[in-house]
């Protein structure tokens, strides 16, 4: 028995050593030839505010925390940094076609260059169009800033993109003063099917993508275009939310599923016009591999193309984010909403992580909570203050939850109800365990390390409802962002160190 155990242990050690040798050789080859594009990991960090002026926050503290996160990336030998929220037309030319403000963008490029980080710039996201260039049929700038420009301003957009790319391309012509590391990879916008970033139709996105690519290539023929920045999900059908300019309201275009959407957008753009396929995945390790392989199959079978795939956002939750599916019955974690005093919503729930489950008891809403109610049909928010139990009702009289209603409740990726970086670390370790050479082939992952000091996600508790759609309630305790691997107050969490150690293993020459 002992000999059998020793042989099995020896066999496992040999397999592990072989894997390390193969991966080390794989990365050593690219390192020796200086091809940093091959390095598999990056960090993703959205810019929420300006680094130069703000009425909302302490700019000096915000800048300090942002730069510190870049330091952590450099210390881990992560060579790629995805910056979203800047490189925006609405930020750089806010006052008209003759006004230029490069202060925030220059800061990002300078800081990344000083730390030997390649910058993946997300061109256009939350302010795709400045107010002066918005479509004249749109009166509400909240819609107009994420909608393609008015037809009379397409030339201004073209000039903006060319000037932007020229400033950071490193060719010595009109470059940023003191440029250290040029920008050679540009990702156009972020999750265009998501109403938060793009309010146009799928065809309008395709057109704007092509126009953006044309301007980028005119400025820098060597630049690489990254997109279309979509996502995978089991949800069917898949929604594309847009603003109907003729009707003056928000509507939804439905694809059969995420692959149908991906195929439609890539076909419209032309596979030859995309240098790197970008995609977002917030999935457990099993589903992560499944979706990556499905995306590869789609590219190979439908487009006969071998393209690098960059997962430009990946994260696993570290907070107790709770989903409640209203009036949905199956055999998992179904309970009756009772509206008990002191425990307005109290139930046994099933914690899940990568096919592992554990039943726990939790209070989802507490006496005195302030609840944000979002109606997905009207895209309007209401606030319910000092919740005391009983019926949860929108201001228009619509009942969200009534005592006696059946709801399905479950935690995602948690073993208990506490804010848990431990469970997040398990999720990252599971992913790294699956990250072998086959998966590494032409794949890069940008880990989510969002500064939750600047953006308190899902707090106070938010309830989403509308029509016959499922209710979802989100609550992140301690006001922490559920995906970040770097706490701005406490520093890096265990998941960060797992990534750092893994990088040291796969290319020890750094």
Image (spheres, rainbow, N blue to C red):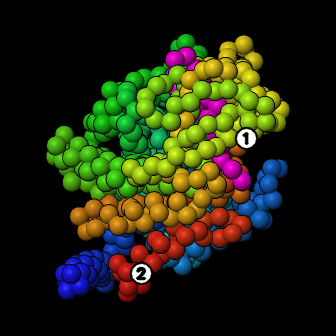
Q: Looking at the image, which residue is at 38% across and 56% down? A: 285
CB within 8 Å, label 1 to label 2 = no
Residue nearest the observer in this picture, 135 or 455: 455
- The mark that comes first in sequence, 1 or 2, is 1
Q: Which quarter shows the C terminus?
A: bottom left
Q: Which mark is residue 332?
A: none
The image shows residue 510, relative to residue 51, as above or below, that is: below
Q: Which quarter shows the N terminus?
A: bottom left
Q: Which mark is residue 460?
A: 1
Q: Position of residue 462 (x, y in %)?
A: 67, 35
Please tell me whether residue 191 belongs to the stretch shown in magenta.
Answer: no
Q: Which mark is residue 504?
A: 2
Range covered by the magenta-colored residues: 460-478
Local secondary structure at mark 1: loop
Q: Residues within 10 Å of mark 2 (few under 14, many from 20)?
A: some
Q: Looking at the image, which residue is at 64% across and 54% down? A: 418
The image shows residue 411, relative to residue 331, as above or below, that is: below
Q: Position of residue 259 (x, y in %)?
A: 30, 36
Q: Is residue 428 left or right of residue 360?
A: left
Residue nearest the observer in this picture, 264 or 363: 363
Local secondary structure at mark 2: helix
The image shows residue 308, relative to residue 156, as above or below, that is: below
Residue nearest the observer in this picture, 332 or 365: 332
């Amino acid at each position: 028995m002992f000999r059998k155990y020793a042989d099995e242990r020896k066999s496992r050690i040999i397999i592990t050593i072989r894997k390390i040798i193969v991966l080390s050789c794989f990365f050593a080859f690219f390192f020796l030839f200086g091809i940093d594009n091959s390095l598999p990991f990056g960090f993703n960090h959205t810019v929420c505010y300006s680094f130069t002026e703000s009425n909302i926050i302490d700019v000096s503290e915000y800048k300090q925390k942002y730069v510190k996160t870049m330091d952590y990336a450099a210390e881990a030998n992560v060579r790629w940094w995805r910056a979203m929220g800047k490189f925006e037309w609405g930020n750089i030319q806010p006052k008209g076609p003759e006004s230029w403000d490069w202060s925030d963008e220059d800061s990002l490029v300078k800081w990344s260059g000083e730390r030997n980080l390649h910058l993946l710039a997300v061109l256009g996201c939350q302010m795709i169009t400045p107010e002066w260039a918005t479509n004249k049929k749109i009166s509400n700038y909240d819609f107009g800033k994420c909608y393609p420009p008015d037809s009379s301003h397409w030339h201004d957009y073209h000039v903006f993109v060319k000037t932007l790319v020229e400033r950071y391309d490193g060719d010595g012509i009109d470059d940023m003063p003191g440029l250290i590391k040029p920008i050679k990879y540009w990702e156009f916008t972020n999750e265009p099917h998501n109403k938060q970033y793009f309010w146009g139709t799928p065809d309008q996105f395709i057109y704007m993508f092509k126009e953006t690519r044309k301007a980028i290539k005119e400025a820098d023929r060597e630049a690489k275009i990254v997109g279309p920045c979509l996502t995978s999900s089991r949800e069917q059908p898949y929604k594309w939310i847009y603003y109907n300019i003729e009707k003056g309201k928000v509507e939804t275009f439905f694809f059969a599923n995420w692959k149908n959407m991906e195929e439609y957008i890539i076909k419209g753009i032309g596979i030859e016009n995309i240098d790197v396929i970008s995609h977002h995945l917030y999935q457990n390790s099993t589903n992560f591999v499944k979706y990556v392989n499905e995306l590869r199959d789609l590219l190979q079978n439908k487009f006969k193309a071998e393209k690098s795939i960059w997962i430009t956002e990946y994260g696993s939750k570290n907070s107790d984010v709770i989903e409640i599916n209203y009036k949905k019955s199956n055999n998992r974690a179904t309970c009756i909403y009772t509206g008990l005093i002191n425990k307005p919503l109290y139930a046994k729930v099933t914690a899940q992580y990568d096919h592992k489950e554990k039943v726990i008891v939790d209070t989802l809403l507490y006496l005195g909570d302030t609840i944000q109610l979002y109606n997905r049909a009207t895209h309007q928010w209401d606030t319910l203050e000092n919740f005391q139990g009983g019926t949860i009702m929108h201001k228009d009289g619509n009942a969200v939850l009534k005592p006696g209603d059946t709801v399905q409740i479950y935690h995602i990726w948690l073993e208990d109800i506490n804010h848990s970086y431990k469970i997040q670390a398990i999720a990252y370790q599971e992913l790294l365990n699956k990250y072998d050479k086959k998966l590494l082939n032409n794949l890069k992952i940008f880990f989510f390390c969002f500064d939750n000091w600047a953006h308190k996600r899902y707090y106070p508790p938010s309830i989403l409802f509308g029509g016959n759609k499922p209710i979802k309630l989100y609550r992140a305790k301690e006001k922490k962002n559920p995906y970040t691997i770097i706490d701005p107050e406490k520093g890096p969490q265990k998941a960060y160190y797992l990534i750092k150690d893994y990088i040291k293993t796969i290319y020890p020459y750094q």
